DNA sequence: TAGAATGCGGAGCGATGCTCCGGATATAAC
DNA sequence: GTTATATCCGGAGCATCGCTCCGCATTCTA
């Protein structure tokens, strides 16, 4: 029982820290190229690191993604607060949604990952997703109170819609114009009062 | 050179035809359970057929999907024509889109496959996708001429949007209500005149 | 410098998509 | 019924994937 105090009680080893950064750098590149479903072997290869090392640092693909995206997501959360303070409610919402799409646009398949994560409390990305939905929900609530956005949707609806827009951007990355156009369709759908959908008889 | 006339010149062998049907039956089940990305080994196992047999009949996953869905898709195309003849343009469009979502809702991941296929002329599903977009485009054009749908979108936009709705349905299959709600948001976005998006300064 | 905690790397498992070919089988001709 | 052959079947095999596990190297503390 002489092993009361370990040799390295706290503070990671320097090489471990170095490898962690190498892996993150590689992951940024590979995920940027292949999307959310990138081969983790490719990441390890590119980082010049064994596969076991990668899994030691990031036991789950979601752990890796979470680290890659946390910064971006935190930025989006604070941006929501800023916009809510400086812009008129509807404009703040539009602006934030647009920023969300730009921020998440780099990684193909991310929209699906975010939606899957939203319903899985065990995922490391779950907290970020909830925070995101919360931010969207706050801006949405203000805009609804201001009478600028239809009242019959909630934060989860909005989060789902904006992710659907991200999904659209994934499908045809070459045609950026379409994404922008469909964004306005979607915003107009949020703006009108509910009930307009019922086709009713043709007005003569 | 006595082999002038082959033993079985035309008409498939009976066992081949039988296996083809077994594979299709199995595929319906397995794809229904696992979605578009189902394991083809599972399909072969369930059909009690060798893997080579499956690949002989359907060299590509898309070949299999195409056979599974052709009937449905043909039905959607004719339904578009029928609706165009019997209903007021906007109502016809709404009805058809709703039917499209119901028809494609059974298979998870189908929305993504359809979008990918739309840009790949070599895919066996490509023809069906184009036909689908065409059908949607025709109904859209009529509704636009009638002044019921915003004029700044085209058939591909519409096809993309409806597939995005299908994607949404994939994400949270448990909450059917959300899909319906977002469908109305989306239809309202189609109905309003363009330009309403610009937030403008807050009205005092 | 010595000891031990810590981290590294890749072999290995089960699964996947897809190819390929020896052998079984159904059909047509006799 | 017999035979011949076109046709088809089945699964072994290759490459890749996600993920685990453990012997060995490295780094830090004392």
Image (cartoon, coloured by chain):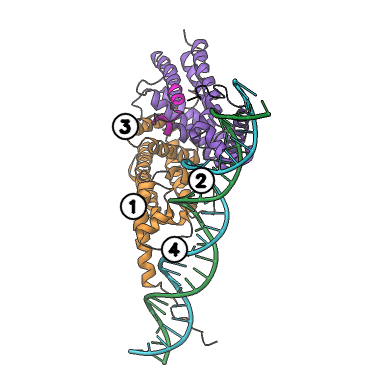
Chain colours: A purple, B orange, C green, D cyan
Report how far apart the C-alphas of labels 4 and 2 lie in the structure: 23 Å
Name the chain under label 3. B
Q: Which residue is mark 2?
A: B116
Q: Is residue A85 magenta?
A: no
Name the chain under label 4. B
Which contiguous range is marked in magenta?
Answer: A116-131
Indicate which disc residue B177 carries: 3
Q: Nearer the viewer, residue B192 or A67?
A: A67
Q: Are discs 3 and 2 less than 8 Å apart at CB?
A: no
Q: Which residue is mark 4?
A: B57
Q: Are discs 4 and 2 less than 8 Å apart at CB?
A: no
**Which label's residue is closer to the chain start, 4 or 2?**
4
**Which label's residue is closer to the chain start, 1 or 4?**
1
Report how far apart the C-alphas of labels 4 and 3 lie in the structure: 40 Å
Circle 1: element type = helix
Report how far apart the C-alphas of labels 2 and 1 lie in the structure: 23 Å
């Amino acid at each position: 029982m002489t092993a009361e105090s370990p040799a390295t009680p706290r503070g990671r080893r320097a090489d471990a820290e170095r490898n962690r950064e190498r892996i993150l750098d590689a992951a940024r590149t590979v995920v940027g190229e292949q999307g959310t479903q990138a081969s983790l072997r490719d990441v390890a290869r590119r980082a010049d690191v064994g596969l076991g090392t990668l899994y030691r640092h990031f036991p789950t693909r979601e752990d890796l993604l979470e680290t890659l995206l946390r910064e971006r997501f935190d930025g989006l959360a604070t941006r929501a607060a800023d916009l809510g303070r400086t812009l008129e409610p509807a404009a703040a919402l539009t602006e934030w949604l647009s920023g969300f799409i730009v921020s998440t646009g780099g990684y193909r398949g991310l929209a699906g990952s975010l939606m899957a994560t939203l319903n899985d409390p065990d995922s490391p990305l779950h907290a970020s997703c909830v925070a995101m939905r919360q931010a969207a929900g706050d801006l949405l609530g203000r805009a609804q109170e201001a009478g600028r956005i239809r009242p019959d949707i909630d934060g989860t609806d909005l989060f789902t819609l904006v992710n659907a827009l991200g999904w659209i951007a994934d499908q045809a990355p070459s045609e950026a114009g379409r994404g922008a156009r469909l964004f306005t369709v979607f915003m107009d759908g949020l703006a009108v009062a509910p009930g307009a959908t019922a086709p009713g008889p043709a007005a003569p």
